[in-house]
Image (cartoon, helix red, strand yellow):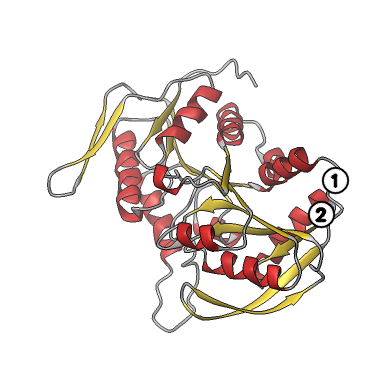
Amino acid sequence: MMYTCRSNIKIFACNSNIELAKSIAKSLGLSLGDAEVSQFSDGEISMKINETIRGADVYIIQSTSYPVNDNLMELLIMIDAMKRASAGRITAVIPYYGYARQDRKTRARDPISAKLVANLLTSAGANRVLTMDLHCAQIQGFFDIPVDNLVGLPLLTNYYSQKYGEDLSEFVAVSPDLGSVGRTRGFATKLDIPLAIIDKRRPKANVSEIMNIIGNVEGKRVIIVDDMIDTAGTITNAANALKERGAIEVDACCTHPVLSGPAIERIEKSAIDELLILDTIELPEEKKIAKIKQVSVAPIFADAINRIHEGISVSKLFD
């Protein structure tokens, strides 16, 4: 898509996902703004903006993924630098919003860190936030500034539609837990395939236990759908359980490939035949294994940035 009639728009990037930032800028027919983001010897963030941004419509691209706190501080400091340099409007483009899982109190004296991060972004000087597939959509309400929460579902369903064409009659979409049913139902509806649900009990953090499968997967090819994969315990346990219950092929997909700790080793050893991910989080070379396929979110973020800049509705991109 060609974008025209734009003026005074600047795209900057911190260090968490430079390749995605370059792709977004390229899709817009722009180059990344001239900025240096590094650290002093004691670990403090050093920031240099090497071009004027006075009155500009500025977009800062930064996923708050691992190392979460360093990447979050980079973003906050760049927002502050832009505000003090008299940027006209500052949009924080956060393809992956870290701390999103800490969105409510589950025990006494728990923090609500997702709300704290929202406060920090607003206090730093962000005028708007553009993100994708927040772990809980209610996090939009933690902000007192506009939030556009893009959806990765069309990118995932398009991949399977192109790969298998009309031959999806043997497939079943599987929700790995009850919390993901809404997302998986949307996926299943888009591809016109049945839905199954895994009912699991999690005895402690990052440990899941498969309890029951609701729906028929015997003799079927299944696609497990989730918003993020962290340590991959849930998704690999689900895949193994589905194979044990007669599934002939198990694929999986997610928007955010956090893939921390033993995730890659677990995926390699699991019953998952193919894992489809989006590039909201940069995938290091050592994690690029044969089972993992990646689709870029750059075009949809470029379209959203162009629409925000031009004052056009972004809601079309939520379809």
Nearest to the eye among marks 1 and 2: give it: 1
Q: Nearer the viewer, residue 68 or 147?
A: 68
Cα distance in 3D space between marks 1 and 2? 15 Å
* Residue at screen point 66% across, 65% down: 180
Q: Is residue 165 left or right of residue 305?
A: right
Query: Do residues under tags 1 and 2 come within 8 Å of each other at their CB atoms?
Result: no
Q: Earlier in the sequence, mark 1 or mark 2?
A: 1
Where is residue 65? Give x, y as percent.
41, 52
Tell me: residue 299, above or below residue 62: above
* Residue at screen point 40% across, 62% down: 261
Q: Nearer the viewer, residue 71 or 81?
A: 71
Where is residue 1? Give x, y as percent.
65, 22
Q: Amino acid at mark 1?
A: Asp
Q: Amino acid at mark 2?
A: Thr
Place residue 52 in its image quadrant: top left
Residue sitting farthest toward the top: 5
Q: Quadrant of the C terminus?
A: top right
Q: Nearer the viewer, residue 319 or 15?
A: 15
Tell me: residue 263, above or below residue 156: below
* Residue at screen point 55% across, 29% down: 309
Q: Callout 2: helix, strand or loop?
A: helix
* Residue at screen point 79% across, 64% down: 195
Mark 1 sits on what residue? 167
Q: Callout 1: helix, strand or loop?
A: loop
- Disc 1 crowd rating (10 Å Cα; few below 14, some 14-19, many 20+) is few
Where is residue 166? Give x, y as percent.
86, 42
Q: Is residue 161 left or right of residue 207?
A: right
Where is residue 227? Give x, y as percent.
59, 57
Place residue 61 in its image quadrant: top left
- Disc 2 crowd rating (10 Å Cα; few below 14, some 14-19, many 20+) is few
Mark 2 sits on what residue? 189
